[in-house]
Image: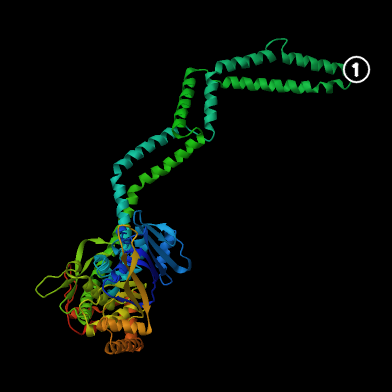
Amino acid sequence: MLQELRVRDFAIIEDIQIGFRPGLNILSGETGAGKSILLKSLALLMGDKADASAVRTGTDQAVVEGSFDLQSRPDVRRRLESMGIECPDAIMVVRRVVGASSKARVYINGALSTLSALREVVSPLVEVTGQAVPLIEMTGQHDNRHLLSRTYHLELLDQYAGTTALRQEHASLWRETQDLIREMETIRASERERAQRLDFLVFQRDEILACELSPGAEIEIESASKRIKHAARLTEFVQMFESAIEGEDDNISTRLSRLISRAHELRGLDPSLPERVSGLETALSQILDVAAELRDYASSLDLDAEALDRAEERLSRLRQLQKKFGSTAEEILAALEHMQNEIGELQSSDSRLKALAERERALEQRRVELAVELHRRRLEAATLFARETNEELSELNMKGLEFVVEIVQLDEPLASGVSAVEFMTKTSMHEPARPLAKTASGGELSRILLAIKQVVGVGQFPRTYLFDEVDTGVSGETAEKVGRRLRSIAAGQQVIGVTHLPQVAAMGEAHFFIAKDLSEKPSISSAQSGATRIARTRVTELDGQARIREIARLISGEKLNSTSMAHAETLLSDAARAVMKSTSGKSKENTSHHLAQRSTGQKPVEKTKLEAMGSKASGAQRPKVENGSGRKQALKKPNATR
């Protein structure tokens, strides 16, 4: 709900501040007072592009601010949260700054934002955001973006028919099916690339396996290569060792043996002497063990050329693998594991494709069933919807206009189903139905929306409706009906309506008077004399006698008299009684219950009765629109949607 609006230096508005109320808010005033400008400022809050020429003469920038209460709009709060915008106390403040010579700026709760983000939050275009529900809807000479949208027409018909839940289920299946189709197309399109990739990975895998690597193998391979390459030098060392230890008569082992024997011979002189040279015995034993190990080592050295070639080849393969996959054996083995996993995935792509195709067929079968059922129920509901809307339009003094709901079955399904829905009008029996955009004026569009909303009822989330020119071309009893319908739509929501009719103004729960004052501003040019007259718009909330006088002015013009004043009081009294009667009456309670059930996705259309009326659905036919009474005969108590 729009709580407060402040506009500064916008066109002829110097500085105004309006506190709107829940329910029906009326704007009235003389022609040229600034009502249209006020609506244009509201359009800026909805995301309209800013025009620097709208900045008030003599000022640098225009500022439009709006405060919205989001207590009953958790969907908008979630949207703000997803954008990273905080929403304390469920209040959202939108601020538009339009510079005379600088770039326009958008702020949401103090955070610099963009026009597209603002539109997504405040007044999302249903063509773009699908199920998003706008905070504000405007219909009239300034903005008809919703009522002229075919997608919006489909939304309204689904709301009336109670098929919203069915449509959401279809959309979910459609999106999942599209994802599967894209995945299968990707697999098929890359078949050649997949085969090439598989061959390449198998080659690399075999290359690594041929090297017979294990963790730390690079050290062992490099050592083995050096050992074989320098086997002659290593053998020469072993021979030198053997010669020194055991090769000659006076070798090291012989000398040590002699010393040990001599120590044992002299133990009679000193019994401790053998023990003192026991270390030599240990050393001699260790030297002989080393000599044996070196002989074994020397025998293991391969001195032939083939062994050297094999070692060099293995080392070369290792160097190549290190360049491709990493410097250590662990890195090369990790790359091998990744290759083997990818090879497995590529080899199993055929089975994956088969599984995807089976899943897609099952989902598509269910989706087609839902699409057929959805299209059938829309066709059935369209006849009743058009009839009820035409009855409402007749009540609103639009008897020469026939409202038509055209439904065409699409060749290709969309997320919303296979139904293309468009609201159209006929101005005579002999002319074909034409789209709303080509036949209806701003005032007619406002009354068409008023009639549709009266038939469809409120949606899941409350919002603010801006009606401009809704009372154009009506008077008397019709004007009173327009006022009552505006008041009915405003229940639990908010309606802001611009009116020139006292019958409509009397139904308001809040009434704002817009006036234009002319004040003189001294000229600053020495070449000029006198003063310049400046127009300024002011807004005043009316109550009591001030409201009676304004309604009397709407009745008789500027010259008020006792008759117009009495008539104004009577209109206000009659409006109050009508509201009390409508809110306390049982019929109103039943209607509200019926609309609430229908708005939450329950089915109001009875198939058997519709078929008896000859509205059996088929293909791309247009539902026949009938005028006349008895619209409730084809309705039954709503049943829960399957």
Q: Is residue 639 visible?
A: no
Residue 288 position (above or below residue 447) = above
Q: Residue at x 44, y 60 (%)?
A: 110
For the residue pair 325 and 434, the one nearer the viewer reads as 434
For the residue pair 626 and 429, the one nearer the viewer reads as 429
Q: How many marks?
A: 1
Residue 244 position (above or below residue 296) = above
Give the quadrant of residue 295.
Answer: top right
Q: Residue furthest left?
A: 430
Give the quadrant of residue 142.
Answer: bottom left
| Position in image of residue 45 (x %, y %) | 35, 64
The C terminus - image quarter: bottom left
The N terminus - image quarter: bottom left
Q: Residue at x 86, y 20 (%)?
A: 273
| Position in image of residue 373 (x %, y %) | 25, 70
Residue 143 position (above or below residue 604) = above
Q: Is residue 221 left or right of residue 156?
A: right
For the residue pair 164 and 116, the one nearer the viewer reads as 116
Q: Which residue is mark 1?
A: 269
Q: Amino acid at mark 1?
A: Leu
Q: Is residue 300 visible?
A: yes
Numbered disc 1: secondary structure: loop
| Position in image of residue 336 (x %, y %) | 45, 38
Q: Is residue 45 left or right of residue 377?
A: right
Q: Residue at x 42, y 40 (%)?
A: 339
